[in-house]
Amino acid sequence: MLTSLLHQSSHWFNRLALWPLLFVSHFLAASLLAWHLLAQVDFGFSLAYPLLEIDQHIERFGPENRYKTGFGETSQEEHVRLFGEITRSIQSSGEGLAEIQYTLPNGQSTTLMRLPEVIHLQDVARLVDHYYLAGLTAAVLLVVLVLYARQRQLTPPRPRKVLWVTGASLAVGGVALWVIGPVKVFYWLHEYAFPEDHPWFFYYQDSLMTTLMKAPDLFGFIGALLLLLTLILWALSGALLLRGFRRGRALP
């Protein structure tokens, strides 16, 4: 009785849950790898800088800041350096955020961010830590499921079906994002992800962090880069996985 029940459960797991779990964990692991690779190049900030005209944005809003002075006169090299330091701090669980400084026209240095901005980026760093944990867990689950499927010589779905389901899912997500509105989704995610008593919305006149990043424009750029690189890594590694399954079934 127990053996029959286990066999039946295994049958339904293999048929309904195995491949969705495998491909979702694969996609999440690929997205984490894409994030980690992009973090090494500061998420393409140097590329986004001219495309989004961040220099003009800083020249306009830097002098209007109510709490900090001199930022509108800083150079592109300084902006790239500052964003790089923010990236490295977020990747290091928020360490050093409060100590990031920029150089004033008189040669003196002053901190870039006020306490509310530091608290917000520390919240972001905690989310990134959770993201790494989820991505690494997905990678381990992926390995376990691949070994499970190989050991039982199970046949994966055809590549065309995988691409169709993935493409349809991305299309539905894209349409939903367009219908709801990217800005509304951006705000909803912030309201859901961060503590209620922690500020996350900053006017350009109140935050050099927001001015430097030209939020939310830069986040859209980074999101597009992340999705593109994730899809590339997912497709390449997926092709290797499918080839491995075919070779495994060809062995005597």
Image: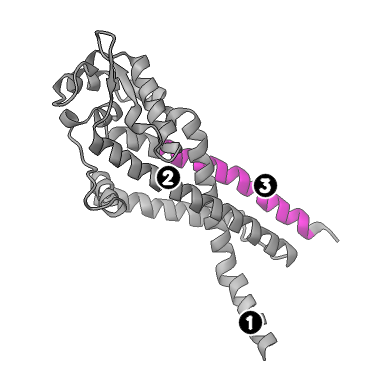
What is the crowding at mark 2: few (fewer than 14 residues within 10 Å), some, or many (at least 20)? some
Tag 1: residue type?
Answer: Gln
Q: Is residue 142 above or below residue 108?
A: below
Residue 159 quadrant: bottom right
Amino acid type shown at disc 2:
Val
Residue 26 in view (yes/no): no
State which tag comes first along the sequence, 1 or 2. 1
| SS class, disc 2 | helix
Judging by the rendered image, the residue that carries numbered circle 3 is 240
Q: Is residue 19 left or right of residue 98?
A: right
Q: Is residue 100 above or below residue 241?
A: above
How far apart are labels 2 and 3 at the CA level? 28 Å
**Residue type indicated by callout 3:** Leu
- Disc 1 to disc 2, how far (Cα)? 39 Å
- In primary-sequence order, the first of circles 2 and 3 is 2
Residue occupied by mark 1: 8
Q: Which residues are magenta?
A: 224-249
Q: Quadrant of the N terminus?
A: bottom right
Q: Which residue is mark 2?
A: 128
- The quarter in which the C terminus is drawn is bottom right
Question: Which of these two is toward me, 201 or 158?
Answer: 201
Q: Is residue 31 visible?
A: yes
Label 3: few (<14), some or many (≥20) within 10 Å? few
User: Furthest residue to the bottom?
Assistant: 1
Q: Main secondary structure of the magenta part?
A: helix
Crowdedness near tag 1: few (<14), some (14–19) or many (≥20) residues, C-alpha within 10 Å: few
Nearer the observer, disc 2 or disc 3?
Answer: 2
75 is higher (above) or lower (below) than 238: above
Q: Position of residue 115 (x, y in %)?
A: 25, 36
Q: Secondary structure at mark 3?
A: helix
